[in-house]
Image: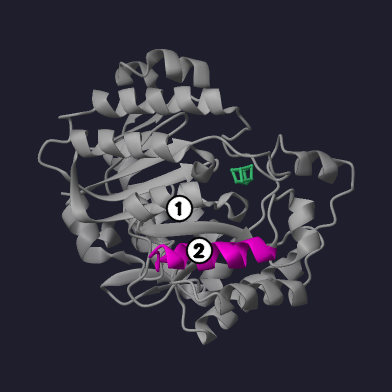
Amino acid sequence: MDVGLYLHFPFCVRKCRYCDFLSFPADEELKKIYAAAMIREIRGYAGTLEGRRVDSIYLGGGTPSVMNEGALKSIFRALGDSFDISPKAEITMEMNPGTVNTRILSFVFDCVNRVSLGVQSAVGEELSHLGRIHTAKDAEKSVRLLRDCGINNISIDLMSGIPLQTPESFRQSIQFAVDLEPSHISCYSLIVEEGTEYARLQKEGRLPLPDEETVSGMFHDAKTCLENAGYRRYEISNYAKDGMVCRHNVRYWKRGDYIGFGIGAASLFEHTRWRNTRKITDYIDNSHEPGRLVREMEQLDKKSEIEEFMFLGLRMDEGVSAEEFRSAFGIPIGDVYGDVIDEEVRKGLLIYDGERVRLTDRGLDVSNMVLSEFLF
Ligand code: SF4
């Protein structure tokens, strides 16, 4: 069975106003020390994936593209020395359009075959409000530069429901993204998270968000515009041209095994979930012994695995397979969820044809509510 690797780079040029990811600005010295710690952590895993082939690697953050390209190349050498990486592995790097330069492109050229570009919006005042460090022009230029260095598998991230956004400006952003002809588009709604600057502004009544109905209209507009442009929705918020789904993210939704490196990185491996320490000093001091980085380890029991199978699998357009359920858990899906499925089918929120269970278009609108029905 193959396995995925996730590498977390927590550094950003500056913090966006809505961001609650594990990310912060740092100087070059700290980035260098962090890269060395990650190399120690990776080498500490050498031999533990014996017989397993790596077929996806994902560099996320933060902003991996603010790292020094030489440090990233050293990290990749450590990966190559420690694991059996398929020559056909999907290797994705998240990039911020404000950080694409010739030095980082030399790493991309050598080591990466897929880039996920955080564009978010094509409208200047929306980008400024979000606290993004780039313009739409930067995004256009980044796509051009990436193509010049041989990257044709490009994903663009867009956001809906952001301050100052209108249905017209959202459609303008979608059209902007489509015109760049990426192979993949992710379109997430803004969630105001506790602890962010946006949460504070919202409490003070100073966050000009579009209302719920408008945001729901944007969700529908995204589907219509992107499907008309030849993208297929394969997950609640993700669209791809034929054959261009993100293999690494599909692994998450299908509960395949993956190992995460870096602070706060999550792993799922052989029925166990864990997360690394979120403290950078802790990480740097203990990376020579990966076992000491582990926090929140949980051996998943059958009940949790069944819940996750449904909760994550139903996010995908193809839904979950009754046969895969039976083969994973040794019981028919109807024995566990027969009543829930019948009820949601009756409400028009699920479809079940005896082979697969999946959300209907109406079910997608209230997906959080439907998915929560599958929790015990
Ligand atoms: S670039 Fe991404 S990770 Fe960094 S602060 Fe902005 S939203 Fe957060």
Residue 306 drawn at (x, y percent): 32, 48
**Disc 1 secondary structure class:** helix
In the image, residue 356 sits, relative to residue 38, either above or below, namely below
What is the quadrant of residue 165 in the picture?
A: bottom right
Q: Quadrant of ligand 1?
A: top right
Q: Is residue 208 left or right of residue 110?
A: right
Image quarter where the C terminus lies is top left
Residue 59 falls in which quadrant of the image? top left
| Residue type at numbered disc 2 | Leu
* Above/below status of 192 relative to 142: above
* Farthest bottom residue in view: 228
Residue 187 placement, left or right of 307: right
Q: CA distance from mark 2 to mark 1?
A: 8 Å
Give me the disc on residue 145: 2
The picture places residue 140, in percent across and down from the top left corner, at: 60, 68
Q: Position of residue 296 (x, y in %)?
A: 42, 25
Give me the residue at 48% from left, 72% from top.
182
Q: Is residue 188 left or right of residue 107?
A: right
Pointer 2 and pointer 1: residues touching (CB < 8 Å)? yes
Does residue 211 show up?
no
Q: What residue sits right under mark 1 in the picture? A: 105
Question: Between disc 2 and disc 1, whose residue precedes?
Answer: 1
Q: Which residues are magenta?
A: 136-158
Q: Nearer the viewer, residue 116 or 186?
A: 116
Q: Residue at x 50, y 76 (%)?
A: 181
Mark 2 packing: few (<14 Cα in 10 Å), some, or many (20+)?
A: some
Seen at 63% across and 75% down, the residue is 176
| Secondary structure found at label 2 | helix
